[in-house]
Amino acid sequence: MLIQKKTDIGISIEENLGLNYYYSLPNKLFDYIRANVPVLVSRLPEIERIVNKYEIGCFIENHNPEHIAEKIKYMLQSPEKISFWKENLKKASKDLCWENEEKILKSVFDTVILSDES
């Protein structure tokens, strides 16, 4: 997904339609982080964990269109919050990148291979 530099906020408002959605971690969340775009997201556990840890955006409390519109308006009319989130997105982008995940994945594979050799 290519995100234009003119994007003000990224939206990932999945609904909890079962365990697959409940524990999902959409790729678009990481696309927004890498593009330095503050996010408006659903309160699903894994998404919430990342957004809270790095303080990179807002949450919707329900999927009512008026509520979502209010949240979007709040975000777009809060330049000081946008600046705060963008600063935090830099740290999130450094932490949540393939280069760091590759080390973790390699460690898991090494552990599995070593345990198979025993």
Image (cartoon, rainbow, N blue to C red):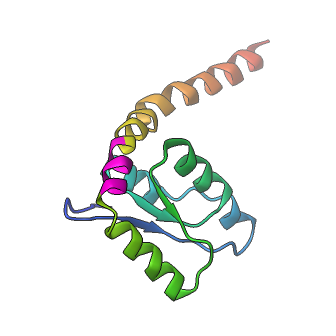
Magenta span has 84? yes
How many callouts does the rendering have?
0
Q: Which residue does the image show at 39% across and 35% down from the upper left? A: 91
Q: Which residue does the image show at 27% across and 61% down from the upper left? A: 3
Indicate whether 30 appears above or below 93.
below
Magenta span has 49? no
Indicate whether 58 appears above or below 64.
above
Q: Observer-nearest residue: 43 or 3?
A: 43
Q: Quadrant of residue 90?
A: top left
- Give the x, y percent position of residue 15: 63, 74
Please state if 42 lies on the left or on the right of 11 as rendered. Answer: right
Please state if 92 lies on the left or on the right of 104 as rendered. Answer: left
Q: Is residue 49 visible?
A: yes
Q: Observer-nearest residue: 2 or 46?
A: 46
Pick the quarter of the image with the C terminus: top right
- Give the x, y percent position of residue 52: 56, 48
Please state if 18 lies on the left or on the right of 94 as rendered. Answer: right
Q: Which residue does the image show at 62% across and 59% down from the upper left? A: 24
Indicate whether 49 appears above or below 106.
below
Q: Which residue does the image show at 49% across and 43% down from the upper left? A: 54
The magenta span reads 80-87
Q: Is residue 37 visible?
A: no
- Give the x, y percent position of residue 16: 69, 72
Q: Residue furthest top?
A: 118
Q: Main secondary structure of the magenta part?
A: helix
- Give the x, y percent position of residue 13: 53, 71
Pick the quarter of the image with the N terminus: bottom left
Q: Residue furthest right?
A: 118
